Amino acid sequence: MIIKTDYLETYSCSGDNRITITREFVDEMRNCEDILMNFVVSDETNVGPVLVEAKRLRDHGDARNEEKDEMEMRNVGLSSRRREHRKMRGECIREFHKVFGRMPLRYSYGKLVSSVGEQGLCVKGGKLVVCDQQIF
């Protein structure tokens, strides 16, 4: 993640009651700090995120990612419990929305590079196409 230090300070040190309450929720859930950071930045800027290139996503700080067996890597960590993990993250979004009193998150097409495929669909000529194929 590339982010201004001002936003990290707001996330970590703000006296804003909304952020204090939601940080406590993140600590309790042990999840969703990335979503809360997006709420904090979007609340301040009122713009969507920009995707920066990532040819291969991995957590370099997690020794389990050094394993050779790809199945073994896939079955570790929070994302291996997909239904439970997604449900928890949905709870986080609902709680943050409730505490902030609005939904600051914005959808964005912004990408710096195209190595990560766009997962959304766009309308072009009356048809749905993969957003990477959309010419603006």
Image: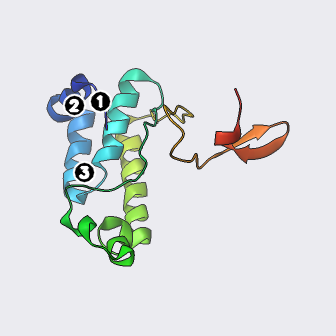
Q: Which residue is mark 2?
A: 8
Q: How are the colours assigned in the image?
A: rainbow
Q: Is residue 56 left or right of residue 8?
A: right
User: Residue 27: x, y in percent?
Assistant: 19, 53
Task: Determine contact: label 1, label 3, CB under 8 Å.
Answer: no
Q: Residue at x 51, y 33 (%)?
A: 111
Residue 109: which quarter of the image? top right
Q: Amino acid at mark 3?
A: Val
Q: Amino acid at mark 1?
A: Ile
User: Residue 65: x, y in percent?
Assistant: 27, 65
Q: Residue at x 34, y 40 (%)?
A: 99
- Front of the two marks 1 and 3: 1
First-in-chain label (1 vs 3): 1
Secondary structure type for disc 1: loop
Q: Is residue 124 left or right of residue 54?
A: right
**4, above or below 69, in the image:** above
User: Residue 10: x, y in percent?
Assistant: 22, 28
Say which mark, if any, is on residue 29.
none
Who is closer to the viewer here, 103 or 126? 126
Q: Which residue is mark 3?
A: 26
**77, above or below 52, in the image:** below
Task: Determine contact: label 2, label 1, CB under 8 Å.
Answer: yes
How far apart are the two marked residues, 1 and 3, measured between alpha carbons? Answer: 19 Å
Q: Residues within 10 Å of mark 2 (few under 14, many from 20)?
A: some
Q: Amino acid at mark 2?
A: Leu
Q: Which residue in the rendered view is the most extreme toward the right?
A: 126
First-in-chain label (2 vs 1): 1
Q: Which residue is mark 1?
A: 3
Who is closer to the viewer here, 94 or 58? 58
- Front of the two marks 2 and 3: 2
Secondary structure type for disc 2: helix
